[in-house]
Amino acid sequence: MTIHGDHPFLPPESERSPVRRFRGRLPSPVGLWTTAYDGKRAGLTVSSMLVADGEPGYVIGLIDPDSDLWETLREARTAVVSLLGAPHRQLADAFGYVAPAPGGPFRLIDWTDTAWGPAPVGVSTWAGCTLVDQDPPEVGWGLQVQLEIVHVELTDDGVPALVHRRGRYVTI
């Protein structure tokens, strides 16, 4: 048996999407989008997002149209967008569905129920948002979901921000 450092399921470089590889070189924030509707909670780790300043401000993200998050967000019309920090790698992986979370990712930490959905306890920066359009445009393989920012929580906790680049987490 030979042990090597390559990823066993990664296709050869010649078969990988150049657009995906280009995107992977962009440092992206690691956000956690959460929502709840009729007793059902849903969440998804989102790195393809940006914040547009203004009155009002907006969060725009690319969301998997087949995700539980989108199904629940479309009904709830509200969401919490949290910016994850260095201690939240496991949480990001669990909500990205790349790491196990026995009982589901919402069991990993405590949550505060807000008017916009569940907010993770211990995450110092988050926004309460409302969905702008229940039928957003498709962009690439995702939906371009636009949320209006209604409320912002900011705490200077000194925790380095979690960033995703080239398939790995880094902190800044």
Image: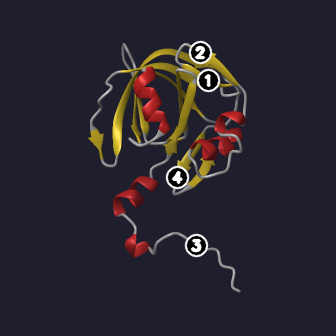
Based on the displayed image, in which of its 4 quarters is residue 74 positioned? top left
Can you identify the residue that label 4 sits on? 165
Of marks 2 and 4, the one in the foreground = 2
Can you identify the residue that label 2 sits on? 114
Q: Pointer 1 and pointer 2: residues touching (CB < 8 Å)?
A: yes
Where does the N terminus fall, quadrant-wise? Answer: bottom right
Q: Earlier in the sequence, mark 2 or mark 3?
A: 3
The residue under label 3 is which amino acid type?
A: Pro
The residue under label 1 is which amino acid type?
A: Ala
The residue under label 4 is which amino acid type?
A: Arg
The span from disc 4 to disc 1 (Cα, nearest Å) is 25 Å
**Res 32 seen here:** no
Neighbor class of circle 4 (other Cα within 10 Å; few <14, some 14-19, many 20+) is some
Can you identify the residue that label 3 sits on? 8
The residue under label 2 is which amino acid type?
A: Thr
Q: Secondary structure at mark 1?
A: strand
Of marks 4 and 1, the one in the foreground = 1
Q: Earlier in the sequence, mark 4 or mark 1?
A: 1
Neighbor class of circle 3 (other Cα within 10 Å; few <14, some 14-19, many 20+) is few
Q: How many marks?
A: 4
Q: Which mark is residue 19?
A: none
Q: Where does residue 101 sit, x and y in percent of width and height?
A: 68, 45
Q: Where does residue 75 sit, x and y in percent of width and height?
A: 42, 23
Where does the C terminus fall, quadrant-wise? Answer: top right
The span from disc 3 to disc 4 (Cα, nearest Å) is 20 Å
Judged from this view, the residue extending furthest toward the bottom is 1
